[in-house]
Image: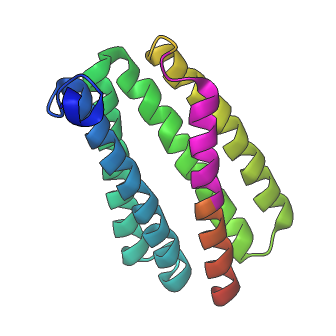
């Protein structure tokens, strides 16, 4: 491996497997969030389709928390609480976009920005500074922008 990449380590080390699993779960999260928004808009927040999509999205949240817990058991529940909070902010964003409640959308965006700061601090602390808060915030900024654009596009169709 070192000769080919100049990097030491094994692709099947616990750290590499954890990183690959994290990447997979985060990618799943983005897709599942989009599916949940689509279900909410097309069938309603009270529909079985939305409930099912939201349940699968929450299963993904629990899987992420379990992965965090495998690194630090005491961080599992705080992470899950923080993560679920950000999902709620996206629900607020989606409802505000659909109902054209600009104040609700703006508050959701502010809440999501604050979440980025909280999540950044969480991961910086969890990793002992190896993962910098700013890097987490930038990554979440991409997630917020991407899902925000999907929310806005779908809201325009379903209004």
The residue drawn where x is 21% and y is 23% is 9
Q: Residue 76's spot in the image, x, y percent?
A: 36, 26
The quarter of the rendered structure image containing the N terminus is: top left
Residue at the limit of the structure toward the front, as seen here: 3
11 lies left or right of 111: left
Compared with 6, 154 (above or below) is below
Looking at the rendering, the stretch of residues picked out in magenta corresponds to: 130-145
Where is residue 117 shown, x and y percent of the image? 67, 31
Tell me what residue is drawn at x 38 percent, y 76 percent.
Answer: 49
Residue 157 in percent (x, y) is at 65, 89
Residue 118 shows in this picture: no
**Magenta-highlighted stretch: main secondary structure?**
helix
Q: Position of residue 12 (x, y in %)?
A: 14, 32
Magenta-drawn stretch contains 104: no
Tell which of 7 and 68 is nearer to you. Answer: 7
Quarter the C terminus occupies: bottom right
Q: Is residue 143 magenta?
A: yes
- Quick check: 95 left or right of 80? right
Choose top left, top right, bottom left or bottom right for residue 91.
bottom right
Q: Nearer the viewer, residue 59 or 124?
A: 124
């Amino acid at each position: 491996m070192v000769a080919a990449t100049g990097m030491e380590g094994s692709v099947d080390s616990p750290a590499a497997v954890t990183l690959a699993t994290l990447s997979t779960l985060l990618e799943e999260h983005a897709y599942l969030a989009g599916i949940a928004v689509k279900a909410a808009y097309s069938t309603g927040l009270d529909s079985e389709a939305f409930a099912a999509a939201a349940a699968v999205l929450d299963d993904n949240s629990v899987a992420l928390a379990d992965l965090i817990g495998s690194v630090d058991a005491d961080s599992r529940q705080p992470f899950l609480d923080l993560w679920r909070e950000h999902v709620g902010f996206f629900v607020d964003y989606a409802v505000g976009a659909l109902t054209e409640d600009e104040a609700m959308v703006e508050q959701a965006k502010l809440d999501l920005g604050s979440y980025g700061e909280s999540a950044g601090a969480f991961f910086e602390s969890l990793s002992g500074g190896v993962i910098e808060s700013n890097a987490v915030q930038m990554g979440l900024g991409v997630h917020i922008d991407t899902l925000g654009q999907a929310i806005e596009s779908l809201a325009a169709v379903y209004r």
